[in-house]
Image (cartoon, helix red, strand yellow):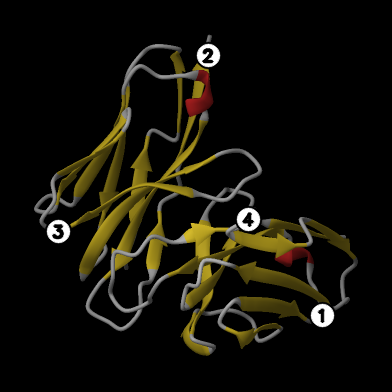
Amino acid sequence: DTAVSQTPKYLVTQMGNDKSIKCEQNLGHDTMYWYKQDSKKFLKIMFSYNNKELIINETVPNRFSPKSPDKAHLNLHINSLELGDSAVYFCASSRSSGGSSYEQYFGPGTRLTVT
Amino acid sequence: KNQVEQSPQSLIILEGKNCTLQCNYTVSPFSNLRWYKQDTGRGPVSLTIMTFSENTKSNGRYTATLDADTKQSSLHITASQLSDSASYICVVSEGGGATNKLIFGTGTLLAVQP
């Protein structure tokens, strides 16, 4: 009965590699998000998709490319990984994106370590 | 620049005691303010969401207040339990647009000791 799930939970890789993180929600939500939480535990939004369309794209290196095959999935692909990409990445979803008070439900996070 | 600041950074209290966490924000336009609880190794979980017109909201032993004039919020935890040990994050949603962009505070790390 997991609401928002992410795989993998842990990812250790070397600099220069390409990796993907997958996210799925079974809540029937229209909007999904990717957040990055750095070593100081500060969460910052990276991307948001509403019904498979990109609606928020923060200042993120273009090595990061989100892909939404359908509204229940939002995957994050990272090219040419760098040491500074090490962080915990959270996926989240909500009913709507439009200026609302809808609650965002977060996944368990993926801890990415780049060596 | 839209910011959310929290205090204290960390707090240690004894089980059964009350505590209050503070949040100041400069986010404009304002849509709503949320408090999240994040256990170690897990994603944040929503505790309360308050809009501009709400100045208090409770969720069990958690009570949040909002003063939209001074742009301050607090989260009061009553009769703390060991399971309350977590990071508490104040989050403000930017309003006025087509998106629900959240601005996160840096969190207050609470440790409840027996």
Spatial CA span between label 2 and label 4: 31 Å
Mark 2 = which residue? B113
Taking the spot 78% from the left edge, 64% from the top edge, the residue there is A83
Rendered location of residue A94, percent (x, y):
44, 68
Q: Earlier in the sequence, mark 1 or mark 4?
A: 4
**Comparing marks 2 and 4, which lies closer to the viewer?**
4
Residue at 34% across, 54% down: B4
Instruction: Give the mark nearer the N terminus: 3 vs 2.
Output: 3
Which residue is tagged 4?
A2
Q: Residue furthest front?
A: A1
Q: Position of residue A27 (x, y in %)?
A: 52, 66
The residue indicated by pointer 3 is B52
> What's under tag 2, amino acid-wise?
Gln
Q: Position of residue B44 (x, y in %)?
A: 51, 49
Image depth: mark 3 or mark 4 in front:
4
Q: Quadrant of residue A11?
A: bottom right
